Image (cartoon, grey):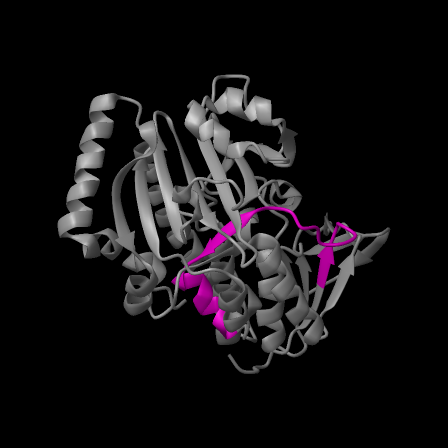
């Protein structure tokens, strides 16, 4: 990206997740004085598998960690689609070579904590200041022209504050006053398992997508050690939603809630920890910039997970923000407004496709499901390139 006239720009990044670490690194490349504030005392190995597509890997390459991510993750061979009833195959699409040819980069799956570790090591190598155990809260000036940070009893003033504190962002509630969540009665269950004792369908190096009635689940390998990531999503009855994304549930509760058939239920005898969380969808913001504060990652938009783009979207945010600041190094307000305009437009499109996928993935009527499966079989057999052509606008991201 190269240095520009931002070496005197003092930047605070609130949150040391994927969005926060990537943004800190890219702004450091511009010569900014960056300090990262993280409320936890250390970064925990939370989360599970994530999928890095070409658009996310593009940004990771600009951070000079793309090779480490690809090497540390797994590159699935196929996308396999199934009817959950009887685990009947709908079709299979080869993705290992197809996606690399089409977009120039491989589809990669890995554990979220592994990506965080790679980014954190890069942050330390670049000697970026990171303050753990430091909860940074917004402090709005009386003239309301700027926002500062209140942390550990002290006021910290910065030229730019990048907020990456997640889907339930306190900064978004206080500064932007528009952290409204859409009502959606769905929950997700997530866990990882070793390959031991799993049926062959889960052992192959594939992404498996199973469509059920009003629900679906996805499996894919995440690490070189042979762990498989399982994600189950379903529509919930009123009052059954989880209260927190870290809520643990017993294996019995998961099996009762998801009502799997006996053959599938037997696959999960070795499950130890299952997390259940509400699928939270925030409204599309009118702006992701206000005063000297800008939102990135889930703080900008908590999106339905039906495009598997959470990590990639966060990486895109960091790249576009850094590019806008590079373009207008002497006019940060103009840079932030341009960033906001560009990202809100793309977030609207991402949100629209994710909401459509939710409807398709969770069809309940048998006739609609039959028609959908018939359509998938036709596309896979005769027009496989069409399956990915509709995603070119997303995966061909260059900022």
Left or right of 316, for residue 149: right
Residue in the foreground of this view, choosing between 148 and 56: 56
**What is the x, y in percent for residue 393?**
30, 58
57 magenta-colored: yes
Furthest residue in direction right, as rendered: 153
Residue in the foreground of this view, choosing between 220 and 312: 220
* Residue at the image position 74 percent from the left and 63 percent from the top: 130
**What is the x, y in percent for residue 212?**
35, 29
**What is the x, y in percent for residue 138?**
71, 49
Residue 300 visible at all:
no
* Residue at the image position 58 percent from the left and 64 percent from the top: 22
**What is the x, y in percent for residue 55?**
41, 62
Furthest residue in direction left, as rendered: 382
Residue in the foreground of this view, choosing between 201 and 76: 201
Residue 346 visible at all:
yes
111 magenta-colored: no
Q: Is residue 16 above or below residue 3?
A: above
Left or right of 40, for residue 396: left
Residue in the foreground of this view, choosing between 165 and 199: 199
Q: Is residue 151 above or below residue 178?
A: below
What residue range appears in magenta? 36-62
- Quadrant location, the C terminus: bottom left
Furthest residue in direction front, as rendered: 197
The answer to which image quadrant residue 235 occupies is top left
The answer to which image quadrant residue 375 occupies is top left
* Residue at the image position 64 percent from the left and 71 percent from the top: 122
Q: In this view, does 353 lie above or below 332?
A: above
* Residue at the image position 18 percent from the left and 31 percent from the top: 371
């Amino acid at each position: 990206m190269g240095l520009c006239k931002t070496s005197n720009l003092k930047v605070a990044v609130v949150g040391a997740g994927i969005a926060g670490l990537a943004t800190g690194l890219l702004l450091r490349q511009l010569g900014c004085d960056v300090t990262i504030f993280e409320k936890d005392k250390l970064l925990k190995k939370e989360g599970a598998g994530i999928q890095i597509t070409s658009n996310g890997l593009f940004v990771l390459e600009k951070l000079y960690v793309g090779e480490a991510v690809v090497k540390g993750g797994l590159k699935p061979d196929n996308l396999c689609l199934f009817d959950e009833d009887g685990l009947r195959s709908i079709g299979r699409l080869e993705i290992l070579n197809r996606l690399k040819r089409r977009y120039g980069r491989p589809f990669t799956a890995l554990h979220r904590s592994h990506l965080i570790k790679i980014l954190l090591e890069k942050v330390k190598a670049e000697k970026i200041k990171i303050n753990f155990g430091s909860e940074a809260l917004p402090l709005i000036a009386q003239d309301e022209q700027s926002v500062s940070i209140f942390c550990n009893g002290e006021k910290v003033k910065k030229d730019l504050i990048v907020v990456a504190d997640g889907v339930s962002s306190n900064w978004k509630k206080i500064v932007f006053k528009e952290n409204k969540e859409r009502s959606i009665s769905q929950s997700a269950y997530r866990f990882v398992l070793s390959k031991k004792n799993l049926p062959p369908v889960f052992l192959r190096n594939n992404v498996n997508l199973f469509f059920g009635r009003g629900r679906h689940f996805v499996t894919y390998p995440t690490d070189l050690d042979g762990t498989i990531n399982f994600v189950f999503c379903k529509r919930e009855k009123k009052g059954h939603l989880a209260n927190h994304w870290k809520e643990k549930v017993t294996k019995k509760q998961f099996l009762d809630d998801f009502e799997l058939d006996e053959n599938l239920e037997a696959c999960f005898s070795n499950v130890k920890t299952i997390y259940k969380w509400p699928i939270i969808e925030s409204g599309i913001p009118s702006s992701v910039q206000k005063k000297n504060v800008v939102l990135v990652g889930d703080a900008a938009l908590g999106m339905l997970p039906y495009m598997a783009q959470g990590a990639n979207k966060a990486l895109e945010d960091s790249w576009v923000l850094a590019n806008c600041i590079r373009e207008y190094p002497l006019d940060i307000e103009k840079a932030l407004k341009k960033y906001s305009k560009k990202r809100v437009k793309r977030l609207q499109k991402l949100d629209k496709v994710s909401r459509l996928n939710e409807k398709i993935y969770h069809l309940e009527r048998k006739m609609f499901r039959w028609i959908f499966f018939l359509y998938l079989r036709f596309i896979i057999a005769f027009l496989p390139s069409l399956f990915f052509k509709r995603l070119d606008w997303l995966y061909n991201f260059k900022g």
